[in-house]
Image: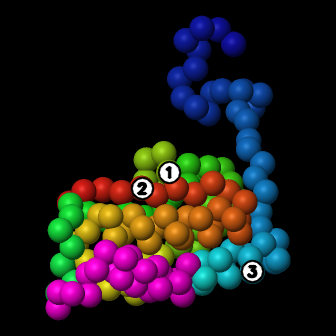
Amino acid sequence: MQLNSVGSIEDLPDNVFYSINYDFLNTNEISIFNNCIQKCHELANSFAEEYINSHNLTTEASRFNHDICGFADVVSYDIENKYCRYALKTGHAYSIGDKILFNNLKKAVPSIQSITYHEYISQKQSEIMTKELGVMFYVHSVRD
């Protein structure tokens, strides 16, 4: 092939392309993943109550927390991991920049405009996911 002889991608020889082979979840791993996500959903309210009680937010009817407004979610930077790819495929997460973000793990918790509150819950959930799925999960927070 001469220099500048390629006019379009179709002109390239087959040996310049490569493929990536990914592992996929087996039935047992799908069950482990689903149980882990369910556990995070079920424990979200108890993590929220832990935070509320430890920060004495029950003293105000509005449970207002004097904190920076914001939110936080569980993320993984291991975008090639089979659990993360499965989460994308099934709608449990979406890709944002260089990370996979699990966006619905706190859907049932009381709404409080406090970044620390959301970070606390997400940190607890990320610890569960790291332990049960064997992938490192982290907290990603954003100020409003």
Q: Which numbered tag is attached to residue 99? A: 1
State left or right for residue 31 relative to residue 110. right
Main SS, magenta residues: helix
Say which residue label 3 marks.
31
On residue 136, which mark appears? none
The residue located at (69%, 65%) in the rendering is 131
Answer with mark 2 or mark 3, whichever residue precedes in sequence: 3
Q: For residue 112, which quarter of the picture?
A: bottom left
Whether residue 93 is visible:
no
In the depicted structure, whether residue 95 falls above or below residue 89 = above
Q: Which residues make up the magenta segment?
A: 40-61
- Dot 3 amino acid type: Ser
Task: Give the CA separation, mark 2 to mark 3.
Answer: 26 Å
Residue 15 is a magenta residue? no
Q: Taking 71 as reference, is 39 left or right?
A: right
* Residue at the image position 75 percent from the left and 31 percent from the top: 14
* SS type, badge 1: strand
How far apart in space, not on screen, are marks 1 and 2 (Cα)? 9 Å
Q: Residue furthest top?
A: 3
Question: Answer yes or no: do the residues labelled 1 and 2 have beta carbons within 8 Å?
Answer: yes
Residue 144: percent from left, percent from top: 20, 60
Label 2 belongs to which residue?
A: 140
